[in-house]
Amino acid sequence: MAGAQRTEEPVPEGAGPKAPLRRLWDHARPHTGVLVVGGLLTFVGGLTGLAQPLVAKLVIDALAEGDPLTTPLFVLGVLVVGGAVIAAAGMFVLERTAQSVVLAARRQLVARLLRLRVAEVDRLKPGDLVSRITSDTTLLRSVATSSITNAVTGVLLLAGGIALMAVMDPVLFGVTIGVLAATALIMGVVLPRIGRATVAGQAAVGEMGSLLERVFGAFRTVKASGAERAEGERLDAAALRAWRKGVDVAGWTALSGTLAGLAVNIAFLTVLGVGGARVAAGALEISSLIAFLMLLFYLTEPITSLVQAATELQGGLAAIHRIDEVATLQQEDTDTDTDTGAGAGAVRADGGSAAVSFTDVAFRYAPDLPMVHHGVTFDAPGRGLTALVGPSGAGKTTVFSLLERFYDPTGGEVRVGGVEVRDWPIAALRSAIGYVEQDAPVLDGTLRENLLMAAPNATAADIADVVERTRLGPLLARLPEGLDSRIGHRGTTISGGERQRVAIARALLRGPRLLLLDEATSQLDAANEAALKNTVLEVARDISVLVVAHRLSTVTSAERIVVMDAGRVRAVGTHAELVAADELYRDLAASQLLTAS
C-alpha cells in the first residue's frame, strides 16, 4: 500500500549487550578510514612514551659509567617533543571525526522525528524528544570515535608495557599484574552501574525539558494565572531529580577513576618495596628499578584511557538506547513522489477536484480511550462549501485529522477524490489539501517563510495575490521589513486575527484541491471576516471547502451543512432545511451560532 506507515531503520534484532554495541559501531563505521588514521597517530604517540623509560635507563647507565650524555638526551628529547606533536594531531583528527558522528546522528534523528505519526507525537513529550537530539547525541561525540581508538590503543600499549615489564623483571611483573587484576574485577562491577545511572540521568534531563516546553508553550497563561511559583516548584523538583541522577553518574565515574589511579599507586609502592629489597640484595640493578617504576608510571595513561573509554562507552550505550527508542515509533513515508500514486491520478481524472466521502467511520484515539466517531457517514462534493457544525466534542476537528491521515480510522472508509486515504501516498494526499488549524499557528521566522512553508516555489506574484485576497496588506505596511520581517515565536508580534489570515494565506498559496478550515475566522473582526468569507466562497467555486464553523454567517453560506453530535452525523442539509427539520441545529442557530456571529 503506497501510503502505508513504516518504521525506518528499526533497531537491530537480538538480545544482550551486543545489539547496542553494533548500533554504536553503525555510527562509527562511515568514518572508519579517519578513525584508523587518528588511532594510528595516537598509537604512535603512545609508543614514543613507551620508549622513554628505556632511554631514561640508558641516561642513568651513562651517568654511572661516565659516558657522554649527548646522544641519549637528544633521543629522549625527540621522543618527548615528537610524541606530544603526534598525539596532538591524533587527538584533533579524532575530535573532528567525533563532531561528524554527532552531526550524522542528529540529522538521522531529526529525519526520524519529523516523520513520526501525529499519534506518536501526541502521546510523547516534546521536551524529551528535543533532549534526545541535543543531550543524547552529544554523548556519542567521543564514545563513537576517541573512546574506540583509545580503547584499542590503550590495550595495545598496556600489553606492550606489560610485556616489557615481564622481560625486565618477572618478580616485579607478577606483583604489578596481581594489583591490576584485582582492580579489573572491581571495575567489572562498577561500569554497569555507570550505564544504568546514565540512562536514568538522561531520562531525568528529558523530563525537565518537557516541563520547560510545557511552561513556555503557555507562558502568557502561566503569567496571567499567577502560577510562576507553582510551575517554578515543579521545575525545581525536576531539576533536583536530574541533579540526583547526575550525582549518581558522577559518583560512580569518580569511583572508577579513583580505582584506576589507586591501582597504579598501590602497584608503585609494592614495586618500590619489593624492588628496593631486590636492589639491596644485588638481584636487580638500580637503573632497572628506576626504568621499571617509570614504565609503571607510564602505564597510568593507557590504564586511565581504558577506564575513561569504558566509562564513556556506558554513556554511549545509554544514548544509543534512548536514540533507538525513536526508531521503534510509528513513522510515515512522506518521501513518495507527490505526482504519482492512485490518489494523485484520481484527482486529475476528476478535473482537479477532491470530493470527500466518509462511510460508516469509527475512530478512537487509543485502544483504552472512548470512541470519538460512531459510524460517521457524509459526502462533500468536489466543489462548494460544506460546513460541519455541532456542540463541542462532537468530533468535527477529528474529521480533518482523518482526512490528513494524522490518524487512521478504526473502522469504515475515508475517501478523497474517490480513493481511500490509506491508498494515497501521504505526500500526495497532503499536497492536495490546504489545512488551517483551529489556533492558526505560525512559526518563528519571517512572514515570507511562514507563507512559503507549504509552497516553497511560489512566485512573487503568487504571494502578492494571496496577500491581497486575505487582506494582509495593512500588516505588511506596518511591519518594518514587510515580508522579510520576523513575527516572533508563535507569531507573538502580530494579533490573533492576523495569525489566522497568515494561516489562511499559507493554505491558499499551496493551491489546494481540498481546503479544510477549522474555525479559521473566529478571531477576525466583522469586516475582515466578511472579506475572507467572500474569498472562501470564491475558492469554493473551484474546489471543495470544508469548514468547522461556529458563526451563523459562515454556516448560512454553505451549500451543505453536516450536523454532528456525540460522534455521529444526525442531519445533512441546507440552513433552511435544517432549521425546519433538526432541533439541535435549530437550537445552535438560535443560540451558539447566532451569538458567535
Image (cartoon, rainbow, N blue to C red):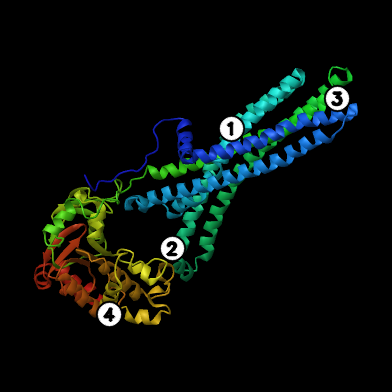
Please say if the residues under marks 4 and 2 sit with CB atoms less than 8 Å apart: no
Choose the circle earlier in sequence order: 2 or 1: 1
Instruction: Report, in whole angstroms, how far the alpha carbon at label 3 lies from the one at label 2.
Output: 72 Å
Instruction: Of the two numbered discs 4 and 1 on the same chain, state the one appearing first in sequence.
Output: 1
Name the element at disc 2: helix
- Sequence-wise first label, 3 or 2: 2
The residue that label 3 is drawn on is 286
Residue kind at label 2, given as amino acid type: Gly
Report which quarter residue 402 is drawn in: bottom left
- According to the image, label 2 marks what residue? 217
- Residue receiving disc 4: 528
Q: CA distance from mark 3 to mark 1?
A: 33 Å
Amino acid type of the residue tagged 4 in the rendering:
Asn
Helix, strand or loop under label 3:
helix
**Which is nearer the N-term, disc 3 or disc 1?**
1
Q: Is residue 418 left or right of residue 334?
A: left
| Residue at 86% in and 21% down | 279
Q: Residues within 10 Å of mark 1 (few under 14, many from 20)?
A: some
